[in-house]
Every structure is written in structure tokens, then in C-alpha cells.
């Protein structure tokens, strides 16, 4: 399963856990229910903007949606070594492929820090 599919699978699990429907998510994203369904089925590519908004709706961090858990690595590597090695290679590729995502997250964090510093200095 690809890295985007893993992210979408986490979104589906969290959405279901919170009791949100396609309609709830679509309304929050200002898109049609059919358009949202296409995101979850992989027919429509998940954009960064949508990922950030979905994380906000689900009250999760973007990083929690895109990171691979240690439990997944342990479960996978307990299988045959060749499968474990393939999985570890996928993790390496995942982080390399998503370097841009992490860079955007870091930039966003830095911008938020600067904004908060500015607000704090105005209050002094």
C-alpha cells in the first residue's frame, strides 16, 4: 500500500472513530459529498491544503496523519526478513518523498512562532 493510501486510511479510521460521515467532512471542506468520497477512495489526489484542513477537522496534527508508527514497523519486521526490508525501504522512501511536506510544516511552525513573538512584544 502506498504512502498516500496509508494517510487516507488513517483519515478514514479517525473519521469513523469520531462518528463523522462523508457529509460531515464534505461540509467542513466546502466540497460535495461525492468529491470527499473520491478523496477517501483515492480517485482524487489529496492536496496539502486539504490534508491540513482534514487534520484540523479531525483535531489531529498533520504529522500524526503522515508519520508511520513504531508499531507498524515492528509488526512488519516480525514477518519474513525480505518483507521487513521492503517495508523499511518504503519508510525511507516515504520520508524522502515527503521532505517537502515536512519543510512546509516546519515553515508553518516558524511562521506561527514569529507571529506569537510579535503578539507578545506588542503586549509588553
Image (cartoon, rainbow, N blue to C red):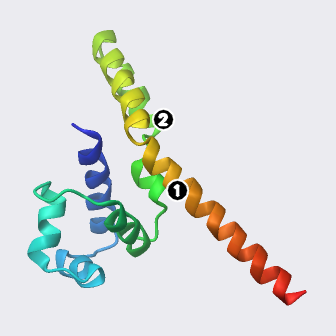
- Whether 79 is drawn above or below 91: the answer is above
Q: Which mark is residue 47?
A: none
Measure how far apart labels 1 and 2 are at the Cα level: 21 Å
Relative to 102, does residue 46 appear above or below in the rendering?
Answer: below
Residue that label 1 marks: 105
In the picture, which quadrant includes the C terminus? bottom right
Q: From the viewer's perspective, is residue 17 above or below residue 6?
A: below
Quarter holding the N terminus is: top left
Residue in view at x 72 percent, y 75 percent: 116
Q: Say which residue appears at 61% left-offset and 62% top-offset.
A: 109
| Residue sitting at x 34%, y 18% | 84
Task: Count residues near mark 1 (Cα–Cα under 10 Å), then give few for <14, some for 14-19, many for 20+.
Answer: some
Please provide percent x and percent y for residue 32: 14, 80
State which quadrant residue 44 falls in: bottom left
In the rendered image, residue 101, in percent from the top left (x then y), is placed at: 44, 50
Instruction: Classify mark 2: helix, strand or loop.
Output: helix
Mark 2 = which residue?
70
Mark 1 and mark 2 lie on one chain; the one further toward the N terminus is 2
Pick the residue in front: 12 or 92: 92
x 24%, y 81%: residue = 24
Toward the top, the furthest residue is 81
Residue 99 in picture, x, y percent from top left = 46, 41
Taking the image as shown, residue 49 lies to the left or right of residue 99, namely: left
Mark in front: 1 vs 2? 1
Amino acid at each position: 500500500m502506498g504512502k498516500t493510501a496509508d494517510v487516507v486510511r488513517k483519515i478514514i479510521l479517525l473519521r469513523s472513530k469520531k462518528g463523522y460521515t462523508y457529509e460531515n467532512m464534505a461540509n467542513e471542506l466546502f466540497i460535495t459529498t461525492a468529491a470527499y468520497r473520491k478523496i477517501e477512495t483515492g480517485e482524487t489526489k489529496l492536496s496539502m491544503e486539504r490534508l491540513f484542513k482534514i487534520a484540523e477537522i479531525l483535531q489531529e496534527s498533520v504529522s500524526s496523519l503522515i508519520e508511520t508508527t513504531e508499531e507498524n514497523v515492528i509488526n512488519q519486521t516480525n514477518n519474513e526478513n525480505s518483507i521487513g526490508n521492503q517495508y523499511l525501504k518504503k519508510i525511507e522512501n516515504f520520508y524522502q518523498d515527503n521532505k517537502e511536506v515536512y519543510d512546509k510544516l516546519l515553515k508553518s511552525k516558524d511562521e506561527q512562532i514569529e507571529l506569537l513573538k510579535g503578539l507578545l512584544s506588542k503586549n509588553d
